[in-house]
Image (spheres, grey):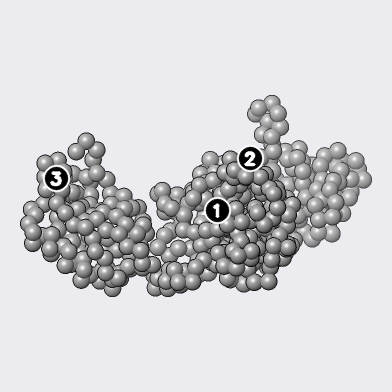
Amino acid sequence: MENKMKETEMLELKKSTSELRDGIKSICAILNKHQKGKLIFGVKPSGEVVGQQISEKTIRDISQRIANSIEPKIYPEIYKKIFDGRECVVVKFIGIEPIYYADGKAYLRVGDEDRKISAKEIEKRIFMKSSGKWDSKVSDGVGLENVNGERLKKYIAEGEKSGRISFSYVDKKIVLDKLGLIKENKLLNAGMILFSDKSDLEVQAAVFAGSDKNTFLDMKDKTGNLFDLLEFSENYIKEHINWGADLTTGTRKDVPEIPIRAISEALVNSFCHRDYTAPESNKVAIYKDRVEIWNPGEFPSEFKPMDFVKMELPSILRNPKIAKILYFNKKIEKWGSGIKRIYDECVSSGVRVEFRVLNYGFSVIFYRKEANQEQISAQIRHKSVTNPSQIRHKWIINYLNKNKKITNSIITLQFTINRDTTREDLNKLIADGKIIKLGAGNNVWYELK
C-alpha cells in the first residue's frame, strides 16, 4: 500500500476475525458517534497488512455475529478486498438510530478508543432524539416584538465583517428567518436567548476576599440576552484582575495576569453549552488565588476535558442553533476547539488552567499569579509597623507604577480590609495630589496623577 492505513474515529483495524468480539464493540462505538464507518480484518492497528484466511463461511459468521450482537439491528456490507497482495475482510456499516448496543452495552468512539456510555447519557440521547433540542423549540411568551433591533443590527455587521454572513440587515423578521431563529413567524428559544430584551438569562458575578466564599467584597447579578451578559462578564473580570505593563517594545502595553482571549473563550463556552432547562445562573467567581467560570449542565460523560486538548474531536453541541449564531460572528472560531484554545492561550502566558467536571456543572478555573506583596505585606502580617495606612499607600503607588490603574476591590483583596478603609486610603492619596479618580457609578478606578 502506498499510504499506510491508520485507525481513526471512523475506521477500526483488527489483525484477524479472532478479535471479532472487540470489532463488534468498535462498530457500536463508531455508529454512536458518526452513524457510519468501516472495520477491516487482516490489518494490525499499526497499519501493517497481515492478511486473513477467508471463505464464504468466514463472511457468513461475521454477518451472523453482528446480527446477534448489535441492537437495533444493522445490515452491514461485508466483502473481501486485497491490500498489499493479501486478502482482508471489510465491514462497511451505517445506522441512524439514537443509540446502539453491543451485547447489551453502549459505547462511543473517542479517537481510536471505544468508551462505555453512561446510563444517564443514553437516556439523554434518546430524549434529545425524540423531542428535539431545546434551542430549536418555539419560545413561550416571547415574540418578535421583544427582539432588540440594535443588538441584531450589530450582530449582522459583525457577521458580515467576519465573512461568515453574506446578507445585510433589512428588518427583524427577514434577518431572523435567514438565521433560522423563527418558525411559522414565532421566535425560537435560541432567538430569545440571543437577542431578546425579555430573556431571563442571568449571570452572578462576585469577588471574594480569600480562597473561599466566606467573605465577599463585591457581588453583582445581571439579567439580559446572551451578548449583553458576555460583555458584562468579561468587563467584570477585567476590572477585578491585576494588570501589568510590558515596556519591551518601547511602547507601554497593558498585560493582564490571565489572557483575555482565554477568558473570552471560556465565557462563550459557558453560555453556549450550558443547560438552558436548568434554573441555575451562570457564575463568575474571583478569588484571591483563582478565577472560576461555571455553567450548569453536564459535561459529556464519555469524554474528559483534556480529550479536546489532545485530540481533534467534533464539538458536542447541546445548543446547536446558539452555537451556529456564535460561529457566524466569530465568537466561536471552530467547532470543538474552545477548550484547546483556552489551554493553549494559558500555556503560552504561563497561567495554570483547570477544567473541572463537577457532579452538576462545569468550571474553567484560571489560577492567578501570586500577589507580589514583598516586604511590605510581610510587615503588615507581622504587625511590625506602627502606621499600616502608610504601608498601604506605598503599595498602591508601587502598584500604579507597574500597572495603569487600580480599583477599590484590588486593594481590599490585597490587604483583607473593608471597603471603607480602602476608600479612606484612596481619598488621602487624592488629597495629597498623588492619584486621580476616574469613571463613575459602579465603574470607578484610580490612576497616577
Report how far apart the C-alphas of labels 3 and 2 lie in the structure. 51 Å
Report how far apart the C-alphas of labels 3 and 1 lie in the structure. 43 Å
Residue 91 image-quadrant placement: bottom left
Residue drawn 66% across the image and 34% down it: 246
Q: Quadrant of the C terminus?
A: top right
Mark 3 or mark 2: name the one nearer the start of the chain: 3
Q: Mark 1 Cα within 10 Å, few/some/many (few <14, many 20+)? A: some
Q: Nearer the viewer, residue 30 or 355?
A: 30
Q: Is residue 346 left or right of residue 199?
A: left
Q: Find residue 161 and name its label.
A: 2
Q: Mark 2 Cα within 10 Å, few/some/many (few <14, many 20+)? A: some
Q: How far across and how far down the image is residue 414, in percent?
A: 72, 53
SS for dot 3: strand
Q: Quick check: 118 above or below 292?
A: below
SS for dot 2: helix
Q: How far across and how far down the image is residue 308, in percent?
A: 44, 52
Residue drawn 58% across the image and 57% down it: 180
Q: Which residue is mark 1?
A: 324
> Mark 3 near mark 2, Cβ–Cβ under 8 Å?
no
Amino acid type of the residue tagged 2 in the rendering:
Lys
> Mark 2 near mark 1, Cβ–Cβ under 8 Å?
no
Residue drawn 14% across the image and 51% down it: 80
Report how far apart the C-alphas of labels 2 and 1 lie in the structure. 16 Å
Q: Quick check: 23 above or below 49?
A: below
Q: Nearer the viewer, residue 32 or 109?
A: 32
Q: Nearer the viewer, residue 211 or 309?
A: 309
Q: Which residue is mark 3?
A: 82
Q: How far across and how far down the image is residue 403, in percent?
A: 73, 40
SS for dot 1: helix
Q: Quadrant of the N terminus?
A: top left
Q: How far across and how far down the image is residue 222, in percent?
A: 72, 62
The tally of labels here is 3
